[in-house]
């Protein structure tokens, strides 16, 4: 092992890099931090604009009168509101992963974050989508009184296409995150086994 | 919380002092792949900059840099799956991590052998090769030094077989 250690030291001498300017890296770090914040806030902003847009549409442009329709609007808006809340909570959770802590702790926090995402992707996302779809269909009876049949058909058709597209996109994201979760759990178990002397 | 300009001198000193160490760990972690190692090293120093406000002198700078290095390596594959953009940034900054390629080639078998170990074992054995004592490694990974000793013994045997 001593020989390997010497080899390792010699290998490092080959990595004696020329003095470099760290300010370029700092600039990149700041830029990365900003774009990460913009991305996270951007998601919340898009959802909030959608919430306001849908709300404004039903308040000023197409105020519904029947109770069933009002329940439908509440379902749609409620689902969006829930989604915004989850996005905010998700940012909070992701910021809890501190890289300057021990591997055991950082892995534990990362597993916690991905497990939280797993819960969101599972029953919570399904509930939100279900609420949205339910809300949309609860509006159909009242809408059909004012909108011609062909337009109703077009509206439902595009709704289904959009739902399928969204489903495929969300599924892709979920698969990647679940793979990360499985790998991190494996590392965490490995660390815990070592910690308990297994 | 983000790092302030007042922390620049500290970052500069950590960067100059630990750049070769970080780069070498990255090389071992990615089986000697130079481009990936540069990319990963860049990611580590970006994380060092971001974590600087949390740096307390409870841990030595070396232990702290090792913690960030190990944690970033373990998260790296997971996050870069989603961020192809990182590779483009690494190309733009690659001159920050230039080194003597001729001499480095000689040690490729060592990096490749280390890279064949499971992820966590790669990182632990590199700390051993860097002559960190068990207590220091324990402070990086968060496992009791006594239990770590047994684990390291097994990793050493695995590495010997791979070389």
Image: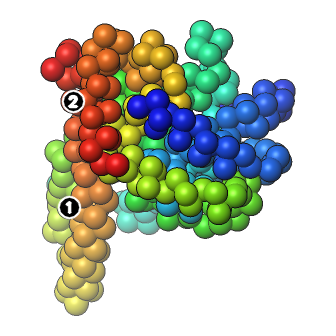
Q: Earlier in the sequence, mark 2 or mark 1?
A: 1
- In the image shown, does A60 or A45 lie closer to the viewer? A45
The answer to whether residue A81 shows anywhere in this view is no
Assign the C terminus of chain A to one quadrant of the image. Answer: top left
Assign the N terminus of chain A to one quadrant of the image. Answer: top left
Q: Classify residue A108 as left or right of residue B110.
A: left
Mark 2 and mark 1, same subunit? yes
- In the image shown, does A167 or B126 lie closer to the viewer? B126
* Point 74% across, 54% down: residue: B96
Q: For mark 1, does the 10 Å Cα neighbourhood hold few (<14), some (14 to 19), or many (20 or more) residues?
A: some
- Residue A133 numbered tag: 1
Give residue A139's quadrant in the image: bottom left
Give residue B65's quadrant in the image: top right
Q: Position of residue A162 (x, y in %)?
A: 29, 74
- Residue A76 numbered tag: none
* Point 30% across, 48% down: residue: B162
Name the residue carrying label 2.
Answer: A189
Q: Classify residue A50 as left or right of residue A25.
A: left
What colour scheme does the image use?
Answer: rainbow
Q: Position of residue A36 (x, y in %)?
A: 57, 49
Depicted A99 relative to depicted B106: above or below: above
Q: CA distance from mark 2 to mark 1?
A: 40 Å
Q: Between tags 2 and 1, which lies in front?
A: 2
Q: For mark 2, does the 10 Å Cα neighbourhood hold few (<14), some (14 to 19), or many (20 or more) residues?
A: some
Element carrying mark 1:
helix
The extreme bottom residue here reads A150
* Point 74% across, 49% down: residue: A17
Q: Position of residue B60 (x, y in %)?
A: 62, 16
Numbered disc 2: what chain? Answer: A
* Point 24% across, 62% down: residue: A171
Element carrying mark 2:
helix
């Amino acid at each position: 092992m001593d020989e390997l250690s010497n080899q390792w030291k010699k290998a490092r001498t080959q990595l004696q890099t020329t003095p470099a300017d760290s300010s370029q890296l700092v600039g990149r770090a700041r830029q990365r931090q900003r774009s990460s914040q913009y991305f996270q806030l951007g998601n919340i902003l898009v959802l909030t604009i959608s919430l306001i847009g849908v709300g404004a549409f039903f308040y000023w442009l197409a105020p519904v009168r029947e109770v069933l329709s009002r329940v439908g609007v509440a379902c749609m808006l409620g689902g969006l509101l829930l989604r915004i809340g989850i996005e905010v909570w998700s940012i909070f959770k992701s910021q809890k992963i501190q890289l300057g802590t021990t591997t055991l702790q950082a892995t534990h926090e990362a597993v916690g974050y991905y497990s939280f995402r797993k819960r969101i992707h599972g029953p919570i996302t399904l509930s939100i989508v279900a609420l949205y779809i339910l809300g949309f269909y609860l509006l159909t009876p009242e809408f059909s009184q004012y909108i011609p049949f062909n337009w109703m058909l077009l509206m439902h058709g595009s709704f289904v296409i959009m739902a399928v597209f969204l489903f495929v996109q969300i599924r892709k994201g979920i698969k990647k995150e679940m793979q990360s979760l499985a790998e991190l759990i494996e590392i965490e178990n490995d660390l815990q086994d070592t910690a308990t002397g297994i | 919380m983000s790092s302030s300009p007042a922390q620049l001198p500290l970052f500069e000193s950590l960067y100059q002092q630990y750049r070769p160490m970080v780069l070498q760990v990255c090389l071992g972690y990615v089986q000697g792949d130079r481009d990936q190692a540069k990319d990963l090293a860049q990611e580590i120093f970006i994380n060092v900059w971001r974590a600087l406000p949390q740096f307390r002198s409870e841990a030595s700078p070396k232990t702290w840099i090792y913690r960030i290095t190990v944690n970033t390596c373990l998260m790296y594959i997971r996050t870069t799956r989603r961020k192809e953009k990182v590779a483009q940034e690494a190309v733009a900054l690659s001159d920050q991590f230039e080194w003597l390629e001729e001499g480095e080639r000689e040690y490729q078998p060592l990096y490749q052998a280390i890279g064949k170990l499971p992820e966590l074992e790669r990182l632990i054995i590199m700390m051993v090769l860097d002559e960190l004592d068990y207590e220091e490694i324990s402070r990086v990974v968060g496992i009791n030094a006594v239990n770590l000793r047994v684990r390291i013994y097994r990793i050493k045997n695995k590495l010997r077989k791979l070389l």
